[in-house]
Amino acid sequence: MPQFTDNDVERYARHLVLAEIGGPGQQKLAAARVLIVGAGGVGGPAALYLAAAGVGTLTLVDPDTVALSNLQRQILFTGDDIGRPKVEAGADRLTALNPRVHIETVAGSLTAANARALIAGHHVVLDGTDDFQTRFAVNAACVAEDVPLVSGALGRWSGQVGVFTGRPCYQCLVPEIPPDAETCARVGVVGALAGVVGAMAALEAIKLITGAGEPLTGRLMLYEGLSATARTVRITADPDCPVCCGSR
């Protein structure tokens, strides 16, 4: 287990006094490796909170560069980052926030061909992408590698967060790509919603790593920003799911 310095004890003091985390939980965070797929609206705030929490290694996967239109909701970046690869700019910001966190970067897309290799060796995967092909590839690889998946999505004024550990999996929830799939670029999104969903996703990852509380395993939290309401629904395993029907 990583050894804490006096500065670490002061930095994580508010975690250390929590009965559900304490010293053992903070040690688990320091030893953890989390893969974040998509360093955008969901992945950015999640990465900031996971770095602040002291997660030992964060791996950022994203093929894009920072654009001016990102800054309305992607708080990992500033105007000076426009044109830079998102993973590069994100790594600089996260290191400035917490130099003790090791940041690994992949300036490319996660695909069905490379997903298992990228996910292997991580303790949790957090998917914040808005592309269903990528979500399906992440889910299938997480099931195959037996790695918990935290999935966050948003659009317009609503968002959702779910945790998948084997069965049911994400494809039980979304069996195939919806023909009317919406993207933030097409339908819009209120910027602050990204922070809400990203923070909730980070919280679920922290709970999975430390063993605190009850993660959203097999459940989906639905948040509606316009009415300030939230509800949680249970996800039913698809008996014919091509991804997880043979898993636990």
Image (tube, rainbow, N blue to C red):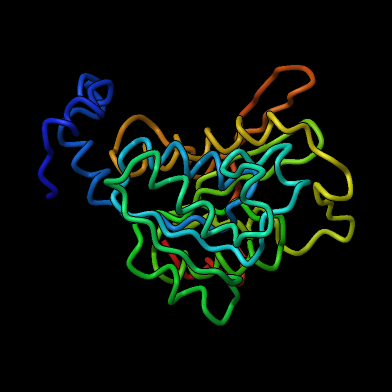
Relative to 243, is 228 above or below? Answer: above
Left or right: 65 as drawn, with respect to 150: right
Which residue is at the front of the view, 216 or 125?
125
Q: Which residue is located at x 82 percent, y 36 percent? A: 156
Quadrant that contains the C terminus: bottom left
Horizontal relation, residue 165 to residue 176: left or right: left
Q: Quadrant of residue 23?
A: top left
Residue drawn at 19 percent across, 34 percent down: 8
Q: State the residue at coordinates (31%, 32%).
A: 212
Question: What residue is shown at x 32% (from left), y 55% (from top)?
Answer: 102
In x, y percent, where is residue 229?
69, 19
Would residue 223 be found to the left or right of residue 46 on screen? right
| Residue 64 located left or right of residue 146 | right
Residue 54 rendering spot, x and y as whole percentages = 30, 40
Given the current orientation, which residue lies at the most extreme front position? Answer: 80
Horizontal and vertical percent for residue 108?
A: 58, 72
The mark tally for this picture is 0
- Quarter assignment of residue 57: bottom left
Residue nearest the viewer, comparing 248 with 64: 64
Residue at the outermost bottom position: 113
| Observer-nearest of 136 and 232 | 136
x and y percentages locating residue 101 in the rendered image? 31, 48
